[in-house]
Image (spheres, grey):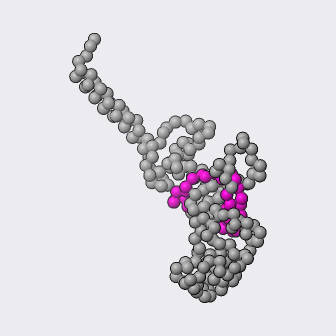
């Protein structure tokens, strides 16, 4: 039985409308609002797989998949975790002689990391977990910074803090105990033409070799 061209056009038109209507009916009941971040998300009702517990977590706690990931991550923090500039990393110990069969993070590039308590880490196996959402930053605060080889070597050889409140390089030195100046105020002011490193101190650790480092002292006000 042959149908007219007009009949076929109407059939296609109403079929599209029906599919669109059925699609909305299917997904509207699955749209939820996350109790943590407040964003709307589509929740898929399906049995959780063995390797995927996020679906069950979203159902139980009514959170979106992104929040579910970070909440479960916070509950099971890996010991290799480090956070720099709001990004979570897994930094594994340095492998002296990696083989071709090894899958190393960051393509096996050598990286150096210094923690806020002045511990240094050398690694050629660094994995990015992801950028931490702002509402989880308090639970996953920054633990340190990536640094260059010079900073790593200097701290590794001599890991002490400095109390020289009159040193003109103090605002650019990672060793300087900034709490002394924050409590008592500046001992002196820097000359306008001062060049970093002019003190020629053998223990000087230049913060310019530390990625995204911000001094707790605002030198603009000094």
- Quarter of the image where the C terminus is located: bottom right
Above or below, 126 against 144 in this view is above
Horizontal and vertical percent position of residue 164: 69, 83
The residue that appears at 74% across and 44% down in the rendered structure is: 99
Above or below, 20 against 219 in this view is above
**Does residue 201 show up magenta in the picture?**
no
Q: Residue furthest bottom?
A: 188
Please provide the residue range marked out in magenta.
Answer: 111-137
Q: Is residue 217 visible?
A: yes
Horizontal and vertical percent position of residue 153: 73, 66
**In the image, is 29 to the left or to the right of 5?**
right
**In the image, is 191 to the left or to the right of 116?**
left
Q: Residue furthest top?
A: 1
Q: Nearer the viewer, residue 194 or 177?
A: 194
The residue that appears at 59% across and 73% down in the rendered structure is: 215
Q: Nearer the viewer, residue 90 or 28?
A: 90
Picture quadrant where residue 150 is located? bottom right
Horizontal and vertical percent position of residue 157: 77, 69
Q: Is residue 79 visible?
A: no
- Quarter of the image where the N terminus is located: top left
The residue that appears at 52% across and 49% down in the rendered structure is: 66
The residue that appears at 61% across and 70% down in the rendered structure is: 208
**In the image, is 45 to the left or to the right of 21?**
right
**Does residue 136 show up magenta in the picture?**
yes
């Amino acid at each position: 039985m042959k149908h007219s061209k007009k009949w076929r056009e109407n059939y296609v038109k109403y079929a599209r409308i029906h599919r669109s209507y059925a699609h909305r009916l299917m997904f509207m009941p699955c749209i939820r609002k996350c109790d943590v971040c407040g964003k709307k998300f589509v929740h898929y009702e399906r049995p959780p797989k063995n390797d995927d517990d996020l679906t069950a977590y979203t159902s139980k706690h009514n959170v979106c998949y992104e929040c579910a990931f970070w909440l479960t991550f916070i509950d099971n923090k890996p010991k290799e975790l480090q956070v720099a500039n709001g990004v979570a990393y897994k930094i594994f110990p340095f492998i002296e002689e990696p083989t071709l069969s090894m899958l190393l993070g960051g393509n096996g590039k050598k990286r150096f990391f210094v923690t806020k308590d002045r511990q240094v880490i050398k690694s050629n196996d660094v994995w990015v977990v992801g950028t931490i959402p702002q509402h989880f930053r308090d639970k996953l605060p920054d633990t340190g910074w990536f640094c260059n080889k010079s900073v790593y070597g200097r701290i590794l050889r001599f890991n002490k803090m400095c109390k020289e409140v009159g040193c003109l390089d103090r605002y650019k030195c990672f060793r300087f105990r900034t709490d002394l100046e924050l409590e008592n105020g500046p001992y002196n002011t820097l000359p306008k033409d001062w060049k970093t490193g002019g003190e020629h101190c053998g223990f000087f650790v230049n913060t310019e070799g530390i990625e995204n480092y911000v001094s707790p002292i605002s030198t603009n006000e000094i």
